[in-house]
Structures are given as structure tokens and as C-alpha cells.
Amino acid sequence: MGALVKETAAFMLQHWEPDGILQPPDPFGTVLEWMWVAEPDRAVGMVSDLLRHLRRGDGATNRLITLDTLMCGLPLTVCALPGEQVNALSDRVEAEVPRLLGGDVNK
């Protein structure tokens, strides 16, 4: 899972413009959808790891990527999930990722 997250972050950093929507690519979304159904805790961990790589990984220099920024595009990535599941995933991510990353992820 680590390689998928790291490569997804690198791809996103390479292709994202700060005035655009930061949306993880389809392969990440497909795995996240499956993981959310099978192991929700690991799905939240995937998103946390993705944000960590987006904020501190290779190519993240001079980029302020917040959880709020990521949450604009994340629901578009899991569009095969029913709406209530997308909302549940979003709620858990917003509640748990700040704790997992140990700080304010919107600064």
C-alpha cells in the first residue's frame, strides 16, 4: 500500500495547479473504495499517509496542501461508493487525520 500512496502523491504534486482541484487519480480511488468497505481504519490511514506525502514528500517544497484542499477532490475519487459511504469516509478522515498526523493539517 505504501508504494501506491507514495506514487499517487508524486503524481498529484506533479500535475496539480494550486487553483485547481487536488484529486487523487482513479487507481488510488479504486483501492480506497475497496479498502473503505473491507477495512475502514486502513482506508483512513491511506488518506492520512497520502496527505503526509503531499505535505512533506518529494516535490512538496513550497506547497501548502491542507486537509481541506485534499477533501475537495477526495469525494470525486470514490464516486463508485454510495453517497452515504462517501460522507462517512469524509467524516472519519476529517475527524481522524489531524490526530494521526499530529497537528493542524489545515495550516
Image: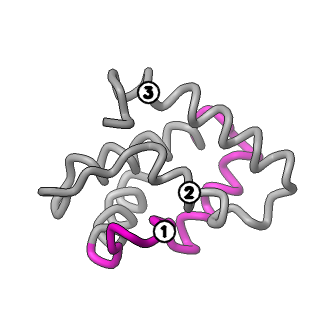
Residue shown at 61%/60% (left/top)? 31
Q: Quadrant of residue 58?
A: bottom left
The residue labelled by disc 2 is 72
Q: Are marks 3 and 2 in contact (CB under 8 Å)?
A: no
Q: Is label 2 in contact with label 1 (beta carbons under 8 Å)?
A: yes
Tell me the distance, in whole angstroms, between the alpha carbons under discs 1 and 3.
21 Å
Q: Which residue is mark 1?
A: 21
Residue 83, percent across and down?
Answer: 85, 54
Given residues 27 and 102, the one toward you in this image is: 102
Q: Quadrant where the C terminus lies?
A: top left
* 26 magenta-colored: yes
Report if the CB atoms under discs 1 and 3 are less than 8 Å apart: no
Which residues are the magenta region?
14-42
Question: Magenta stretch: residue 46 in it?
Answer: no
SS assignment at label 3: helix
Residue at horizontal 44 percent and vertical 40 percent from the top: 48
Ranked by sequence position, the earlier of labels 2 and 1 is 1
Q: Secondary structure at mark 2?
A: helix
Which residue type carries mark 2?
A: Cys
Q: How many marks?
A: 3
Examine the rendered structure and indicate whether residue 29 appears above or below residue 83: below
Q: Amino acid at mark 3?
A: Pro
Q: Nearer the viewer, mark 1 or mark 3?
A: 1
Q: Is residue 99 above or below residue 18?
A: above
